[in-house]
């Protein structure tokens, strides 16, 4: 059996080297090919003819790879070596890379849905989620900051954005039913975690075929600011589960996974889960996750 290791060598700090990862994978009984993240396009994945795609990197590397998989019947092993590792943590893959590799079992699989946003500029896949308002604005602030010593952290930028946020001029429908009330942020989540490991969507289930729509009402602003200081327990947000989400309106900050952008006035976006999910090697020491067989 052959594994293809897709590796982001600059991911995280203190992460295992390519040599250490290759040694662990070979010790687990796999033949091995290797690609750096920047070389891992769909054509290279087809050419590799691998029985397993192993992704060693952070959320960006994981998302970029699973979105272009030419064959989603080929199982994927996530080796989380980034900073947040939201996708891996949402799937219960929290052990050290060497332990995860030693425990690989291609017969134990869980599903990871891939979301899709039908936007004015085309269809865009996503793994974590898409959002509008305060959180999207905070990503833009962090990304555009050029002062290496004075840039806010992700949580600091989000607290500032929540503090200043105005209600969003958006109309939201979930499975044909309009969502009432004002919101300072709207997050359509495929996994529970996003950003700096914030559990903004506790009800999200990565392989359930549905999305979790998280909204923050203006009346919960102060409670949210307090939660962001100490993000333990569930956040003070409303959560709604659905298969198809329509967003109409615009002139608001937007994000697709970790990419900030802007929704122009008069736009409409349709968000749903793609029909075919990705098959992920499950953590064998977590019966609750391992029972969700693909």
Image (tube, rainbow, N blue to C red):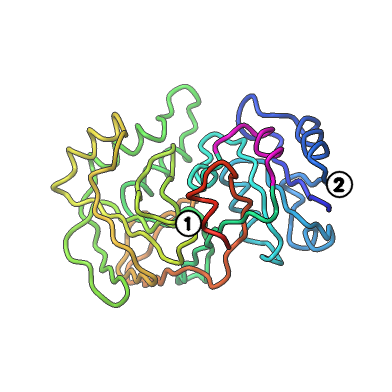
Range drawn in magenta: 94-104
Location of the C terminus (image quadrant): bottom right
Residue 14 falls left or right of residue 138 = right
Figure quadrant of residue 10: top right
Task: Identify which residue, 59 or 1, lies in the foreground.
Answer: 1
Q: Secondary structure at mark 1?
A: loop
65 and 100: which one is in front? 100
Q: Position of residue 2 (x, y in %)?
A: 83, 52
Q: Which residue is mark 1?
A: 206
Q: Secondary structure at mark 2?
A: strand
What label sits on residue 110 in the rendered view?
A: none
Q: Between disc 2 and disc 1, whose residue precedes?
A: 2
Report how far apart the C-alphas of labels 2 and 1 lie in the structure.
Answer: 30 Å
At x 69%, y 49%, the residue is 105
Kindly identify which residue carries mark 2. Answer: 31
**How busy is the neighbourhood of tag 1: few (under 14 within 10 Å), some, or many (20 plus)?**
many
In percent of the image, x 22 and y 67: which residue is there?
Answer: 179
* Residue 101 sits inside the magenta stretch: yes
Q: Residue at x 21, y 50 (%)?
A: 166
Q: Position of residue 170 (x, y in %)?
A: 26, 65
């Amino acid at each position: 059996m052959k594994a293809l290791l897709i590796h982001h060598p600059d991911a995280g700090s203190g992460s295992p080297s390519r040599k250490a990862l290759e040694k662990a994978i070979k010790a687990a009984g796999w033949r091995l090919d290797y690609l750096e993240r920047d070389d891992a396009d769909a054509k290279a994945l087809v050419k590799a003819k691998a029985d397993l795609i192993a992704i060693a990197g952070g959320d960006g590397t994981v998302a970029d790879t699973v979105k272009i998989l030419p064959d989603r019947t080929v199982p994927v092993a996530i080796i989380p070596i980034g900073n947040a590792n939201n996708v891996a943590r949402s799937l219960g893959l929290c052990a050290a890379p060497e332990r995860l590799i030693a425990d690989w079992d291609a017969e134990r699989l869980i599903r990871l849905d891939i979301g899709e946003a039908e936007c004015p500029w085309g269809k865009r896949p996503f793994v974590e989620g898409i959002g509008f308002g305060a959180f999207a604005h905070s990503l833009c602030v962090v990304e555009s900051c050029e002062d290496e010593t004075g840039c806010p952290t992700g949580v600091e930028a989000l607290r500032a954005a929540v503090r200043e946020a105005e209600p969003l001029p958006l109309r939201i429908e979930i499975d044909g039913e309009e969502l009432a009330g004002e919101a300072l942020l709207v997050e359509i989540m495929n996994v529970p975690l996003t950003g700096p490991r914030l559990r903004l969507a506790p009800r999200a289930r990565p392989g359930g075929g549905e999305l979790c729509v998280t909204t923050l009402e203006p009346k919960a602003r102060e409670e949210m600011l307090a939660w962001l200081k100490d993000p333990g327990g569930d956040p003070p947000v409303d959560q709604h589960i659905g298969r198809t989400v329509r967003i109409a309106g615009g002139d608001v900050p937007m994000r697709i996974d970790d990419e900030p952008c802007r929704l122009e006035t008069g736009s409409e976006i349709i968000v749903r889960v793609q029909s075919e999910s990705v098959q992920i090697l499950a953590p064998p020491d977590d019966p609750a996750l391992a029972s969700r067989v693909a």
